[in-house]
Image (tube, grey):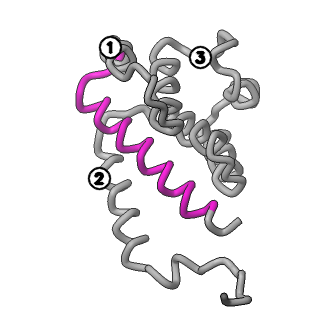
Amino acid sequence: MSSNTQPVNLLQSIPQVFESLTQVHVVLDQHDLDPALKHLIHLRASQINQCGFCVKMHTREAREANETNERLDRLIVWRHVSDFSHSERAALAWTEALTLLDEKTDYASLRGELRAHFNDEQIGALTAEIGMINLWNRLQVSRH
C-alpha cells in the first residue's frame, strides 16, 4: 500500500477528459434552459453531494447572475418554502431524484410534473445538466 494519500491532480492526469466534459457544457448551453434554473440545480446537487468547492462556486455564480441571497439560503429547504416557482420546484425534485437514486422513486410522476413546465428538449437538457453536475461533484469530492 502506498503512503502517498495526496489527491490526484485530475486536470493534469486526464486533461482530454476535462476538455471533453467542457465541450458537453458548450453543447448544453445551446438548449433553451434558463440559466437561473441551471444555477439552482447545480447548487442543489452540489449541496446533496457535499461538494464544498462546487457549493461555493455555484453560490457565487448564482449571486453574480442576480439570484437573491434569500432564495439561495432557502434552497436546501425548497420543499418547505414558497420562494420557488412551480417549474423550479419540478426541476429541483428531478434534480434530487437523479442525485439521490432510490428504487422507490416514481420517475413517471416526476416526468409528468416536468412536462407541465418544460418540453422534451428542455427535459433532456435538464437531465444532462443534472448528470454532469453529479459527475463534476464526484470528481471534485475525490480530492477531499
Q: CA distance from mark 3 to mark 1?
A: 18 Å
Instruction: Return the disc, 3 or 2, that comes first in the chain's sequence.
Output: 2
Q: Of the numbered discs in the image, which one, if any, rests on residue 84?
A: 3
1 and 2 marks in contact (CB < 8 Å): no
Q: Nearer the viewer, residue 70 or 91?
A: 91
Mark 3 burial class by Cα count in 10 Å: few <14, some 14-19, many 20+: some
The label number, if any, that marks residue 27 in the structure image: 2
**Regarding mark 2 in the picture, which secondary structure is present there?**
helix
- Mark 1 or 2, nearer chain start: 2
Compared with 87, 57 (above or below) is below
Image marks 3 and 2: residues in contact by CB distance under 8 Å: no
* Residue topped by disc 1: 112
Amino acid residing under circle 2: Val
Quadrant of the snapshot with the N terminus:
bottom right
Q: CA distance from mark 1 to mark 2?
A: 25 Å
Q: Is residue 82 highlighted in magenta?
A: no
Residue 97 vs residue 45: left or right?
Answer: left
Q: Residue at x 56, y 54 (%)?
A: 137
* In this rendering, position of residue 26 left or right of residue 134: left
**Residue type beneath disc 1:** Gly
Residue positioned 38% across, 54% down in the render: 25
Amino acid at dot 3: Phe
Magenta stretch, residue numbers = 117-141
| Cβ–Cβ under 8 Å for marks 3 and 1 | no
Percent coordinates x, y for residue 63 in the rendering: 67, 40
Which numbered disc flags the more N-terminal residue, 3 or 1? 3
Residues under labels 3 and 2: Cα distance?
27 Å
Q: Residue furthest front?
A: 1
Q: Residues within 10 Å of mark 1 (few under 14, many from 20)?
A: few
Query: Which-is-in-front pick, marks 3 and 1?
Result: 1
Mark 2 Cα-neighbour bin, 10 Å: few <14, some 14–19, many ≥20: few
